[in-house]
Image (cartoon, rainbow, N blue to C red):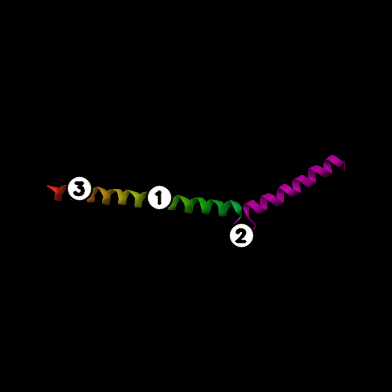
Amino acid sequence: MTEFEGQVLADLSVLKSQMKQLMGIGQPGRLTQLEDRVEQHERSVQRIKGLIGAGGALLAMFHLAVDYFRR
């Protein structure tokens, strides 16, 4: 085996171990954990959007009530 072949096999071994770490070996890997974090973040963003929308509606009703009682 030449030095080049040995280097290629060593690099492939490192790549294989990194892929196992990324995908997980029987346990959730980094990729699964990252997907879960992104999904949780998207849920949080949607929840905040809903709260801001509800707050805007309440503020509009408050302004309408103030204008109604001024007259």
C-alpha separation, residue under disc 3 versus residue under disc 1: 27 Å
Between marks 1 and 2 in the image, the one whose residue lies nearer the viewer: 1
Based on the picture, tell me whether residue 12 belongs to the magenta stretch.
yes
Q: What stretch is highlighted in magenta?
A: 1-28
Query: Where does label 1 land, which residue?
Result: 46
Question: For the N terminus, which image quadrant?
Answer: top right
How busy is the neighbourhood of tag 2: few (under 14 within 10 Å), some, or many (20 plus)? few
Query: Which of pointers 3 and 1 lies earlier in the amino acid sequence?
Result: 1
Along the viewing direction, whichever of 22 and 55 lies nearer the viewer: 55
Q: What element carries label 2?
A: loop
Residue sitting at the far bottom: 27
Q: Main secondary structure of the magenta part?
A: helix
Amino acid beneath label 1: Gln
C-alpha separation, residue under disc 2 versus residue under disc 3: 56 Å
At x 20%, y 48%, the residue is 64
Q: Is mark 3 on a helix, strand or loop?
A: helix
How busy is the neighbourhood of tag 3: few (under 14 within 10 Å), some, or many (20 plus)? few
Query: Where does label 3 land, which residue?
Result: 64
At x 35%, y 52%, the residue is 51
In the rendered image, residue 4, in percent from the top left (x then y), is placed at 84, 40
Residue sitting at the far front: 70
Amino acid beneath label 2: Gln
Query: Where does label 2 land, which residue?
Result: 27
State if disc 2 and disc 1 touch (CB < 8 Å).
no
Query: Which of pointers 1 and 2 lies earlier in the amino acid sequence?
Result: 2
Along the viewing direction, whichever of 1 and 36 lies nearer the viewer: 36
Amino acid beneath label 3: Leu
Residue sitting at the far left: 71
The label shown at residue 38 is none
